[in-house]
Image (tube, rainbow, N blue to C red):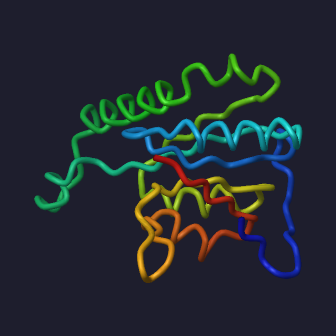
Amino acid sequence: MLVRSGGTDCRPGPDGPEVVLGVDTREAAADVIDFAFRAAARRGAVLRAVHGWTPPPVWGYAGWAAPQPEAEQFRAIEDELLTLAMTGWQEKYPGVTVIQDSRTGSGAAALVDVGAGADLVVVGRRRRPHHHAGLRLGPTAHAVLHHAQAPVAVVPHD
């Protein structure tokens, strides 16, 4: 857990206090999601599940964006992946309101942006054998720790 010195200047969103959860839809980690739901329940906060994604690189190499119908198909697929990752959790924590937020761009940038006024930002870190250089963070957790204004919880998972 990282809390910046001087405390935080959290501004409740339109739905009240908010816990922001970074979701890797390809490998959603139950430990991370459960931690975020418990934190939101304790705070009486809304849980915002955030997933950042980028279109397939083929269009980037060509120097042009995907045609609108294909871009919308990618967005629908990513939205569905986020829905699948969050399936079952609302039933386990019925008192927590969930907002699903799937957006184009890096997950780190989305979490830093959305987490600016949050009470807590929750990200995961895969457990790896201890390295002589200390804990090893992935690029998303690293960026969020360095740039988020809100307190950040890094939850290890398998």
- Residue occupying the point 83% across, 43% down: 14
Res 5 quadrant in image: bottom right
Q: Is residue 106 left or right of residue 8?
A: left
The quadrant in which the N terminus is found is bottom right
Most foreground residue, 91 or 117: 91
Residue 66: x, y in percent? 22, 45
User: In the picture shown, does residue 24 fall above or below 122?
Assistant: above
Q: Nearer the viewer, residue 23 or 60?
A: 23
Q: Residue at x 47, y 68 (%)?
A: 137
Q: Position of residue 24 (x, y in %)?
A: 45, 45
Could you tell me how many numbered marks the image carries?
0
Q: Position of residue 88 (x, y in %)?
A: 59, 19
Q: Residue at x 24, y 34 (%)?
A: 70
In the displayed structure, does residue 19 sit left or right of residue 145?
Answer: right
Identity of the residue furthest to the left in this view: 62
Task: Identify the residue shown where x is 43% and y is 26%.
Answer: 80
Q: Locate residue 93 relative to residue 42 in the image: left or right.
A: left
Q: Is residue 22 above or below residue 90?
A: below
Above or below, 97 relative to 109: above
Q: Quadrant of residue 62?
A: bottom left
Instruction: Pick whichever, 12 or 64, lies toward us.
Output: 12
Q: Is residue 101 left or right of residue 40?
A: left
